[in-house]
Image (cartoon, rainbow, N blue to C red):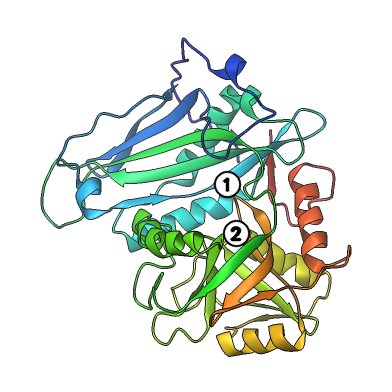
Amino acid sequence: MKTSLAIPVKKTQSSKLAETDFSNLVFGRIISDHMFVADYKNGEWTDLRIESYAPLQLNPSNAALHYGQSIFEGLKAYKNDAGEVLIFRPDANWRRMNESAERMCMPSIPEEIFMEGMRQLIDLDRAWVPSAKGSSLYIRPYMFATDDYIGVKPSDTYKFIIFTCPVGNYYSKPVSVKVETKFTRATEGGTGAAKTAGNYAASLYPALQAQKAGYDQLLWTDGKTHSHIEESGTMNVMFKINGTLITAPTHTGTILKGITRDSVIQLAKDWNEPIEERFLTVQELKEALENGTLEEAFGTGTAATIAHIQLIHIDGQDYKLPEKPANAFSYRVLAELDGIKYGSKEDPHHWILKF
């Protein structure tokens, strides 16, 4: 989109770029030099600026710390062979962030502020976008309440920030998952479809218990009966059974509307792959594992793109998935998405913002 939005820039005096080892990028640990900031007060977004990434100063009575009004997004930028920066589906992240904001009683972010703040920030820190395949620049937009007030009500003031970090692969190998039938990630009427901080806080304890038991992540089940699969860890999840892809629908409000999920579904339709958006029951999954009709299972998300699942634990038993052929759907769709993101494949759905 064309814009005349002028954003003041105060460049850092001490760049960390030269001391960064781009061959050893630990996910989320290395932060780029600058951040975009905007403040919401008196009913409007003001004081847009780009400045050095630095600690924030907050009051002990900050409303977000007490009542959890905090939302965020996650997306990535890539660099093609010509040195151009390519951002994957940022408009979808902007729309989803505003859906989260509505659910959490927070102000919407104008498209121009979201898109131009992000674009000008990344243009300034262009050198931070890794060139190596498998690496990218992770982009974290987030908003939180800033009222200095102890009282259960929506805040009147907010801060919106975007910062970035160069990252490598999120998962270095296929993952093992455990079907969770005690703890709940989200229930109907709750905040499961919002990308809000509290959802992730609630998932930490059961995820930690699974990791102590030797599993990488959980397969979350519904909060009422724990009878059907919803998500995998912090990702949407897909199963291919008897040639058909199955993934949970998002209409219940308990599942995040994943942008990678949506992209995979679109590519599956482009390729005329049978796909069903419906809940897979735990019993169906167990039977498919036992009779050999489960061909593959994988998570979809911004961080991992496609996370291959190698083992599923159900009812006290581990089920190892079969070896996948080289032309398995999850391999093909990962290659297609990576090709679009790095600019080596056509972008028929206009998912890429290039500059």
Q: Residue furthest top?
A: 13
Percent across and percent down for residue 290 are 71, 87
Residue 136, labelled with which disc? none
Mark 1 Cα within 10 Å, few/some/many (few <14, many 20+)?
Answer: many
The residue sitting at 70% across, 46% down in the picture is 352
Percent across and percent down for residue 92 are 57, 55
Specify the amino acid type for callout 1.
Leu
Quadrant containing the N terminus is top right
**Image mark count:** 2
Residue 259, labelled with which disc? 2
Percent across and percent down for residue 63 are 20, 47
Q: Could you tell which of marks 2 and 1 lies nearer the N-terminus? A: 1
Q: Please say if 271 is above or below 285.
A: above
The residue sitting at 28% across, 58% down in the picture is 105
Residue 75, labelled with which disc? 1
Quadrant containing the C terminus is top right
> Within the image, what quadrant is residue 77 found in?
top right
Residue 107 in view (yes/no): no
Specify the amino acid type for callout 2.
Ile
Front residue of 7/322: it is: 322
Percent across and percent down for residue 217 are 54, 62
Q: Are marks 2 and 1 in contact (CB under 8 Å)?
A: yes
The residue sitting at 38% across, 51% down in the picture is 71
The residue sitting at 83% across, 61% down in the picture is 332
214 vs 355, left or right, is: left
344 vs 5, left or right, is: right
Front residue of 186/293: it is: 293
